[in-house]
Every structure is written in C-alpha cells, then in structure tokens.
Image (cartoon, grey):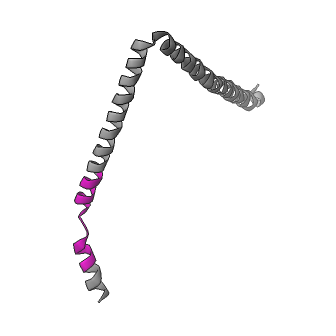
Amino acid sequence: MAKLDNNNENKNKKSVAGNLGDQVQKAIENAGDKVKETVKEASELAADAITHPVETAGEFGKQAVKDVTSYSWWAKLLLILFWLILGLVAAVLIIINLPVT
C-alpha cells in the first residue's frame, strides 16, 4: 500500500529537469531585476556627477581613502605572516642541519 502511495506522489512531482528549469528561470528573473536596479543607480550617479562634479569627486576621494585604510591592515598582516613563516622555515632548516656540522 505504501508503495502505491509513494508511486502516486512521484507522478505528481516534476522531473529534475523541470525543477532545474524553474530554478534557472527564477535566477534569470532575479538577475534581470538586479541589473535594472544597478543601471538605475549608475544613471543616478552619472546625473549627480554631471550636476555636482566637485561633490562627487570628493565622495569618490573619501571612499578611496576608506578602501585604502581598510586594506592596509590586511597587507601588514600578510607581510608579518610571510616573514614569520619564512623565519620558522629557516630556523627549522638550521636546527635540522646543526648535527651535520
């Protein structure tokens, strides 16, 4: 009896290809909406840049400073990690080769 119920449920379900097609269609619709929103924001930014060029340049400058300062600590961290690992590898090689000399 359970097998018949399960079989009836399987008939009502869509195939994998049908589900995948629906998911792809939804993703395309969502991407289209995001593209429209991005284009709208870009056109507003361009309009602002044309009407208020000095303020727009100032905003871009401020954002650039924020980006540089937020990435500089990553650069310092990676530099410290590089030299630390290089130093540890050198120390291990020296310790391994000490008995040879």
Tally the numbered discs.
0
Q: Quadrant of residue 13?
A: bottom left
Q: Is residue 97 or residue 7 the one in the foreground? A: 7
Residue 39 left/right relative to 88: left
Q: Main secondary structure of the magenta part?
A: helix
Residue 63 left/right relative to 13: right
What residue is at 76 percent from the left and 30 percent from the top?
A: 95
What residue is at 59 percent from the left and 19 percent from the top?
A: 68
Q: Residue furthest top?
A: 54
What residue is at 57 percent from the left and 17 percent from the top?
A: 62
Residue 83's spot in the image, x, y percent? 68, 24
Residue 65's spot in the image, x, y percent? 59, 17
Q: Is residue 74 or residue 50 the one in the foreground? A: 50
The vertical placement of 76 against 27, above or below, is: above
Q: Is residue 88 or residue 32 the one in the foreground? A: 32
For the C terminus, give its image quadrant. Answer: top right
Residue 58's spot in the image, x, y percent? 54, 13
Over which residues does the magenta segment extend?
8-23
Q: Residue furthest bottom?
A: 1
What residue is at 24 percent from the left and 53 percent from the top?
A: 21
Residue 97's spot in the image, x, y percent? 72, 28
Residue 81 left/right relative to 46: right
Q: Residue furthest front?
A: 51
Q: Is residue 7 or residue 41 the one in the foreground? A: 41
**Residue 25 is covered by the magenta coloring:** no
The vertical placement of 69 against 53, above or below, is: below
For the N terminus, give its image quadrant. Answer: bottom left
The vertical placement of 24 against 90, above or below, is: below
Q: Quadrant of residue 85?
A: top right
